[in-house]
Image: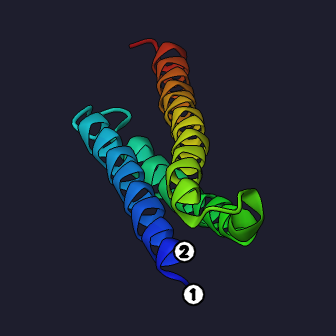
Amino acid sequence: MTLYEGLYFGIALSGLGVFCWIIHIMGQALTSCPDTGRAARAGSLVIMTGFAAIGFGVVALIAAFLPRLTLDGAANLYVTPGLAAVALGIGRTMAADQLRQVVSAAADRIAAAKAQRGG
């Protein structure tokens, strides 16, 4: 592994870790609700682990094409972390939307159950 590949992995995997942490923090913020807190906690853990697995795959795929992008290794160090950041950012946005859907579905089920009981 060259110096540039090592730097790329360091930068990209750090970004992946930060995005996973952000997803975890979003889930933790939603757990304070007594009705949907359990769904938010479980949903954020499942979504975060799925994001980490897919994100690592994206980082590895970009690294596989790293030697073929340009002839200059230093230029790769500018292009590839940016590409990884864009891909991981899009994935984080989709993860946040999925977490919103999980919590919304849990709230809808609870509201329906309360309406059925008459309370």
How many marks the image carries: the answer is: 2
Vertical placement of 69 versus 31: above or below?
Answer: below
User: Type of residue at label 2?
Assistant: Glu
Tag 1's secondary structure?
loop
Q: Residue at x 60, y 66 (%)?
A: 53
Q: Where is residue 91 in the image (x, y as percent from the top left)?
A: 59, 42
Q: Position of residue 25 (x, y in %)?
A: 28, 45
Residue to which mark 2 is pinned: 5
Residue to which mark 1 is pinned: 1
Q: Are marks 2 and 1 in contact (CB under 8 Å)?
A: yes
Q: Which of 46 and 70 is in front in this view?
A: 70
User: Type of residue at label 1?
Assistant: Met
Q: Which of 108 and 59 is in front in this view?
A: 59
Q: How crowded is mark 2: few (under 14 residues within 10 Å), some or many (20 or more)?
A: some
Q: Residue at x 40, y 42 (%)?
A: 40
Q: Residues within 10 Å of mark 1 (few under 14, many from 20)?
A: few
Rendered-image quadrant of the N terminus? bottom right
Vertical placement of 80 versus 85: above or below?
Answer: below
Q: Classify residue 98 as left or right of residue 68.
A: left
Q: Position of residue 62 (x, y in %)?
A: 68, 61
Tag 2's secondary structure?
helix
Label 2 vs label 1: CA separation? 6 Å
Q: Nearer the viewer, residue 97 or 7?
A: 7
Rendered-image quadrant of the C terminus? top left
Q: Classify residue 70 as left or right of residue 23.
A: right
Q: Residue at x 50, y 13 (%)?
A: 115
Q: Quadrant location of residue 114?
A: top left
